[in-house]
Structure formats: structure tokens, C-alpha cells
Image (cartoon, helix red, strand yellow):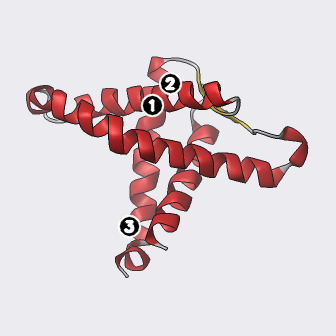
Amino acid sequence: MKFLLKLIINAFALWVTTLIVAGVTVESYDPSNGTFSLILTYLLIALIFGLVNGIVGTVLRIVALPLYILTLGLISLIVNGLLLLIVSWISDAMGFGLHVDGFWAGVWAALILAIISWLLGLIFRPALRR
């Protein structure tokens, strides 16, 4: 239940991010199916982002630890932007999903995504603690 709620929160945050940041779009895996396929696409992208963030992101954060200390954590924007670009590359290879136009669009999208996920996490924190 906790995993599913976090997945839905991240998918919703990704949807809001695509509305705010101009260089980030999502292409449904089956455009003829309508809203259901678009929702499923957002959930799949959120799952891919969670996996990439958990595996690749952890390695990048450990390797970049001196830069985190040196920049007082601001390098996390760059790392999260790179992770979003990796998710874009993986979903493009699968034939659907997230499209990020460039590095800076990825950085802005990562910032917006982190803020929205954090806010939604605050709202749903009592449900996540159970």
C-alpha cells in the first residue's frame, strides 16, 4: 500500500511537472486508448524513475559526495536532472514515455518534481506511516 501510494504521488507530480515545464512531455504508449493509457504511462514512468533513482541515483550520490559537500547540496539539482534524462532515454527506448528536450529542461523539471513530490508527501504522510 505504501509503495503504491508513493508511486501515485510521483506519477501525479510528474503530470504536474509536464504542465509547468515547457521542455518536458509525456507520450502515451497507446494514444488510441485515451486517458487510461496515459495514466498507465505516467505510472510506468514513475516506476522507472523510482528504479533509476534507487539504483543509479544512489551510486551517483556516493560518487559525488565531495561535490555535495563543496556545493552545500546544490549539485543534487544537476544529479536529479541527469537522472530524469536517463529516465527519458529508457522510456524512449521502450517506445513511450517521458521526453526531455535538454539538460536545463531536465534540471528545472527535476526541481519542480521534487517540490511537488515533497508537498504531496507532506499531505499524505499520515497515510504513508501506517
Q: Residue at x 82, y 40 (%)?
A: 30
The answer to which quarter of the image holds residue 107 is top left
Q: Give the Cα separation between the discs numbered 3 and 2.
A: 26 Å
Place of residue 12 in the rendered image (x, y in percent of width and height, measured from the top left): 58, 54
Q: How crowded is mark 3: few (under 14 residues within 10 Å), some or many (20 or more)?
A: few
- The residue at 45%/18% (across/down) is 103
Q: In this view, does 93 lie above or below 76?
A: above
Toward which corner of the image does residue 19 lie, by quadrant? top right
Rendered residue at 65%/32% (across/down): 25
Along the viewing direction, whichever of 110 and 97 lies nearer the viewer:
97
Q: Which residue is denoted by mark 3 in the rendering? A: 122
The alpha-carbon separation of the residues under discs 1 and 2 comes to 5 Å
Query: Where is residue 123 shown, x and y percent of the image?
Result: 43, 70
Q: Are marks 3 and 2 in contact (CB under 8 Å)?
A: no
Q: Residues within 10 Å of mark 2 (few under 14, many from 20)?
A: some
Q: In this view, which residue lies farthest toward the bottom? A: 130
3 or 2: tag closer to the N-terminus: 2
Tell whether label 2 touches label 1 (CB within 8 Å). Answer: yes
- Give the residue pinned by disc 1: 108
Residue type at mark 3 is Leu
Q: Is residue 24 visible?
A: no
Q: What residue type is labelled 2?
A: Ala
- Nearer the N terminus, badge 3 or badge 1? 1
The amino acid at mark 1 is: Trp
Q: Which residue is drawn at 63% across and 26% down?
A: 92
The disc at residue 105 is 2
Assign a secondary structure to mark 2.
Answer: helix
